[in-house]
């Protein structure tokens, strides 16, 4: 709420209004209902300062603004402001790729790291909209917990702009061996097909765990979004976690400009909050059975025993393939 100096009153039976100059702050509005609004004097509004920088144009553009701190409205506000900022610059276009590097500072908790690339998708969704939706999802998950009230102190967003569609599809993947022993190194060769570009070959070395059992070992070659989606399919993702576990999970999410290789064994894996315990022996599972009964522990039938990735690429990688190798 602000005090104001009335300059003119325009009378109208349809929509009368006043022209004013606002002056100093007087308080904040705390309720907005159908029949009226309510404010409180001598109280400061809770706002989140946002610094948004766009690099890659003729000159660097920097935006400083504040969004309201509200569990329901803050995710929507951050989505709208980020999309408008990216959409409103002269460099905006349909073939633009953005590289995001930023942080969300929550009081009393580690910073939430924001690092990803956004390119126009095959379904026609603009990269700016993808960036806005991703940030809204992060804010929504921070606020959506039943244990802690998050105090977001600041948001810093740094976008690098590239004036072309930097997107690549995982076209094929293969291993140099079909059989291996525990401890052996296996080379996984992947072929990426960029948008209107020449194919790119990436080789990734993975080592078979010394504890690997004889039989078939599955190798998942995928983008980061596929790995995160597998985690979301776990029933534990639908449960309400505390804020510390939520932030830890957010910081463990994979970037989408790498190719990931995951080794999957047919052994049970347990997940407690943001902690993952692969290849648990049956004796340990029996000891932890009480946690499983009250849903604090979620058990899946397959364990990810190792994960390797390429160096960051200049493309948003999309696609996944499943390979198999025999452990002797």
Image (cartoon, rainbow, N blue to C red):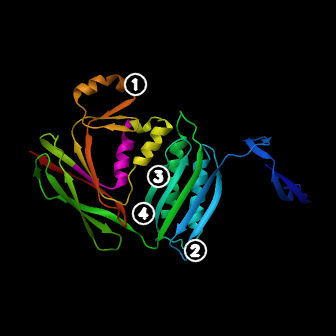
* Badge nearest the viewer, 3 or 1: 3
Q: What stretch is highlighted in magenta?
A: 219-235
**Residue at label 2?**
90
Q: Residue 294 carries which label?
A: 1
Q: How crowded is mark 1: few (under 14 residues within 10 Å), some or many (20 or more)?
A: few
**Residue at label 4?**
121
Q: Distance between the residues labelled 3 and 1?
A: 31 Å
First in sequence, mark 4 or 2: give its number.
Answer: 2
User: Which of the 4 image quarters holds residue 19?
Assistant: bottom right
Q: Are marks 3 and 1 in contact (CB under 8 Å)?
A: no
Q: Is the magenta stretch mostly helix, strand or loop?
A: helix
First in sequence, mark 4 or 1: give its number.
Answer: 4
Q: How crowded is mark 2: few (under 14 residues within 10 Å), some or many (20 or more)?
A: few
Q: Which residue lies furthest to the left in this view?
A: 328
Percent x, y of residue 195: 36, 70
Q: SS for tag 3?
A: strand
Q: Is residue 123 above or below residue 24?
A: below
* Badge nearest the viewer, 4 or 1: 1
């Amino acid at each position: 709420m602000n005090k104001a100096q009335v300059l003119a009153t325009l009378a109208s039976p349809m929509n009368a209004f006043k022209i004013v100059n606002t002056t100093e702050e007087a308080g904040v509005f705390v309720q907005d209902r159908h029949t009226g609004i309510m404010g409180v004097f001598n109280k400061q509004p809770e706002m989140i300062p946002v610094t948004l920088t766009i690099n890659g144009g003729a000159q660097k553009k920097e935006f400083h603004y504040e969004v309201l701190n509200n569990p329901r409205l803050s995710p929507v506000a951050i989505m709208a402001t980020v999309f408008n900022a990216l959409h409103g610059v002269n460099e905006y276009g349909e073939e633009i790729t953005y590289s995001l590097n930023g942080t969300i500072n929550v009081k009393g908790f580690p910073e939430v790291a924001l690092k990803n690339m956004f390119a126009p998708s095959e379904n026609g969704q603009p990269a700016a909209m993808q960036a806005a939706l991703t940030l809204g999802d992060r804010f929504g998950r921070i606020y959506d917990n039943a244990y802690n009230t998050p105090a977001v102190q600041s948001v810093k967003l740094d976008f690098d702009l590239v004036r072309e569609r930097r997107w690549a599809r995982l076209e094929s993947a293969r291993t140099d061996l079909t059989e291996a022993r525990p401890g052996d190194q296996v080379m996984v060769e992947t072929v990426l097909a960029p948008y209107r570009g020449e194919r790119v070959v990436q080789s990734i070395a993975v080592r078979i765990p010394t504890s690997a059992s004889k039989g078939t070992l599955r190798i998942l070659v995928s983008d980061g979004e596929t790995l995160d989606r597998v985690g979301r399919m776990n029933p534990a993702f639908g449960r309400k976690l505390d804020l510390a576990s939520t932030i830890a999970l957010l910081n463990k999410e994979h970037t989408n400009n790498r190719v990931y290789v995951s080794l999957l064994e047919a052994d049970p894996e347990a997940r407690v909050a943001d902690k993952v315990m692969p290849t648990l022996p049956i004796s340990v599972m029996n000891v932890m059975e009480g946690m499983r009964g009250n849903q604090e522990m979620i058990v899946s039938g397959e364990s990810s025993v190792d994960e390797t990735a390429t160096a960051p690429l200049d493309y948003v990688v999309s696609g996944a393939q499943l390979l198999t190798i025999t452990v002797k």
